[in-house]
Amino acid sequence: MLEFPCHHLLGPGCCTLLLVSCGYALQPLPSCDGTPNLSPLLTPTVTPLSSVPNGDSYLLANDTTNYVYLAKVRGTAYEMGYAQGQLFKDELQQQILNLEAIYPENVRDALDTFGIPKSVVQMMPDWLVTQVGKVLLDVNWIVASQWIPQRYADEMRGIADASGIAYERIRRANLLPELIQAHCTVLGAWGNATSDGKLYHLRALDWDAFAPINQYPIIVIYEPSEEGSQVFANINYLGWIGTLTSISKIGISVGEKVMLPRVGSSDYPIWPTVTYFGKPWQFTLRDTIQFATSLADVSSILTATHRTMRIHGGWGSAPDHSFRGMNFASNFVELFDDKNYTHNNEVSHPQMDGVFYFDKHVQPSGDQCLKNIITPFYESGSINEETMYRDIVGGHQTGDNMYVVMKPETGEIWMASSEYGKPVKAYQRSPIYINLSNFW
Ligand SMILES: *[C@@H]1O[C@H](CO)[C@@H](O)[C@H](O)[C@H]1NC(C)=O
Ligand SMILES: *[C@@H]1O[C@H](CO)[C@@H](O)[C@H](O)[C@H]1NC(C)=O
Ligand SMILES: *[C@@H]1O[C@H](CO)[C@@H](O)[C@H](O)[C@H]1NC(C)=O
Ligand SMILES: *[C@@H]1O[C@H](CO)[C@@H](O)[C@H](O)[C@H]1NC(C)=O
């Protein structure tokens, strides 16, 4: 297995060390640390919470620990932000503290990637790291602002105005992901690889499993009045408006994963570079979901964007009935289907018709776990949502913070986040089933 030191927030080295000690009674597959997640599927009860001129909110809960909030907002970006601020005025006061509570750890890791010696970073008290982090996030906003579409500033301004929280606090929190792209697993399966021929898309988020922002997992459904927009759902935590996982009503879906190029390798067409002078990756991804109506659109949006960070991604598309994996950096974009991924190899990553994936490790990983899990399902053409939330998530121990299985052709999703206030990772938890078509 190729591993790197923990120089990013989610250094795979740290994950792997931790995972080795997590045993289960069931026997894991060869090369896998985990076993299937057998927690039962839950269908939540939908409770309306509140209505304001541009939005409505709901709690989707099975019990006091298994829940996700849902908001539907419409109008201009400012109006949609304002509605979120009104609907979750009380929750946002707590959530901004939850978001700020993750600064010290995340900023320490970011400082490390900026080349500040670990010994120095360790000597800095949390309050100082937080102060430095705020300055970095403010500088990031300044240098990137000419590439950030006005809709993001407007939406954050709306949230701030309605909630009474300072705009700068909301803005800093929303740029944090630019410093700390997460690990994760990306997998798409479609056509004769799946049990009903439909497309399934797994996004498993491996990142700071117990960040207290998991108090408020939320699906925000946007109905933007802006021309050319699709209705789309952002599956995230309250207060974060960029994309971790998003899916549109017409069935374009996305999830990402950090790219850590292997020093001295030629894994990419050119050495991937990074810049802060461009459109933050979370906004780039969200705009593909708001505006694309096909994979060709996704490709042209990505190509035309002033990209910043190094990330991998996956896009599902109901209109194309297909899926693309992606590598992007500030200096190139590459998309792959099930046939032309450049790092297929027989041992760890064989070519499979109707399947594309990046496992949770540094790419190309050489790890065989994910291949071992999906091969029998692939060979019998029976990959479905269960393969993803039960076998992959549990067996590969991926999605410690959150996992989402999406079915773009029907708008159904199955998701879980880590448990608030308890050390239970998302991949150990019950999937919550939501038919987004009931809310679009
Ligand atoms: C929880 O989910 C189970 C399984 O779908 C369902 O039978 C039960 O009614 C749900 N309970 C509530 C309170 O939503
Ligand atoms: C792989 O094939 C897709 C079309 O299915 C194409 O859009 C993409 O550019 C190809 N990628 C490479 C690296 O050739
Ligand atoms: C899916 O179709 C391809 C050719 O189109 C074939 O090679 C493969 O064996 C099929 N898979 C299954 C599970 O039938
Ligand atoms: C999802 O909801 C839509 C709209 O209510 C409904 O037509 C569809 O049958 C539902 N899908 C499933 C799988 O239940």
Image: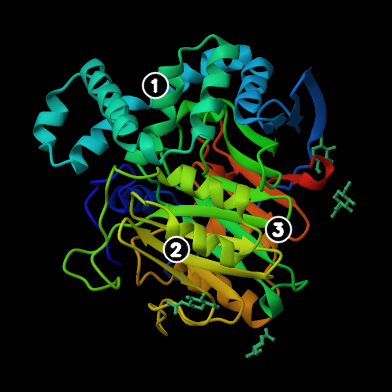
Tell me the tag on residue 359. 2
Q: Measuring 78% from the left and 71% from the top, which residue is drawn there?
A: 196
- The residue that disc 3 covers is 408
Amino acid under label 1?
A: Ala
Q: Mark 2 or 3 closer to N-term?
A: 2
Q: In x, y percent, where is residue 232?
A: 68, 44
Q: Quadrant of the N terminus?
A: bottom left
Q: Quadrant of residue 3?
A: bottom left
Q: Residues within 10 Å of mark 3 (few under 14, many from 20)?
A: many
Amino acid under label 2?
A: Asp
Q: Mark 1 or 2 closer to N-term?
A: 1
- Position of 48 relative to 262 (above/below): above
Q: Measuring 61% from the left and 18% from the top, which residue is drawn there?
A: 85
- The residue that disc 1 covers is 101
Query: Label 1 to label 2, Cα distance in Å?
Result: 29 Å
Query: Label 3 to label 1, Cα distance in Å?
Result: 34 Å
Residue 298 visible at all: yes
Judge from the rendering whether residue 415 lies leftward or rightward of residue 302; answer left or right.
Answer: right
Tell me the tag on residue 382. none
User: How many badges with numbers are in the image?
Assistant: 3
